């Protein structure tokens, strides 16, 4: 009998406070997957890149949504969180600025993750 294949769920958040429901959906799906034991790589791109900075998630408000700081903490504890290189650079965010546990990486790393055997990518 073959062992089940490990799957990677790659979730890319492209929205921040500019599209709060889409942003919240990305964080909610990714953190739910982590809580369910799924291997998750969560990407902060576009306006969501701001959430890589300390305190920024606490500023996000959306009625009837889980608090973003709680979801981000769960993702940092059980998954991998990446801020897009170009998105960070456009916002003058450096590796020294981001929360512990968040890496800055670019398209090559994203492509490597989403094309890995068994990977599933979702973009919000």
Image (tube, rainbow, N blue to C red):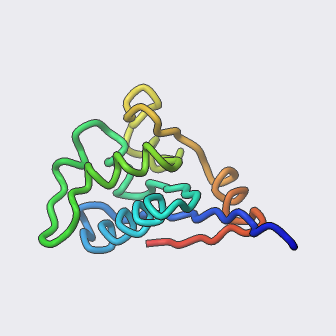
**Residue 11 locus on image (x, y percent):** 51, 64
Q: Is residue 96 above or below residue 13?
A: above
Q: Is residue 107 above or below residue 15?
A: above
Q: Along the horizontal axis of the image, is 25 left or right of 4? A: left
Task: Identify the residue at horizontal 34%, vertical 46% (top origin).
Answer: 73
In this view, the residue farthest toward the top is 96
In this view, the residue farthest toward the front is 1
Tell me the quarter of the image containing the C terminus. Answer: bottom left
**Residue 6 locus on image (x, y percent):** 70, 63
Task: Identify the residue at horizontal 49%, vertical 55% (top origin).
Answer: 43
Count the marks. Answer: 0
- Closer to the camera in the image, 62 or 30: 30
Quadrant location of residue 65? bottom left
Task: Identify the residue at horizontal 68%, vertical 58% (top origin).
Answer: 113
- Closer to the camera in the image, 39 or 21: 39
Tell me the quarter of the image containing the N terminus. Answer: bottom right
**Residue 93 locus on image (x, y percent):** 40, 37
**Residue 117 locus on image (x, y percent):** 78, 66
Q: Is residue 74 above or below residue 122?
A: above
Q: Along the horizontal axis of the image, is 91 left or right of 2? A: left
- Closer to the camera in the image, 57 or 85: 57
Q: Along the horizontal axis of the image, is 18 left or right of 4? A: left
Task: Identify the residue at horizontal 46%, vertical 39% (top origin).
Answer: 102
């Amino acid at each position: 009998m073959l062992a089940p294949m490990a799957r990677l769920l790659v979730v890319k958040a492209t929205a921040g406070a500019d599209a709060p429901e889409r942003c919240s959906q990305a964080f909610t799906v990714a953190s739910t997957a982590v809580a369910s034991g799924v291997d998750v790589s969560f990407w902060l791109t576009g306006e969501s890149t701001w959430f890589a900075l300390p305190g920024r998630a606490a500023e996000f408000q959306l009625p009837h949504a889980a608090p973003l700081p709680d979801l981000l903490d769960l993702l940092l504890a059980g998954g991998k969180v990446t801020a897009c290189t170009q998105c960070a650079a456009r916002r003058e965010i450096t590796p020294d600025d981001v929360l512990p546990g968040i890496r800055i990486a670019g398209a090559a790393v994203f492509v490597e993750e989403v094309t890995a055997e068994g990977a599933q990518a979702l973009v919000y």
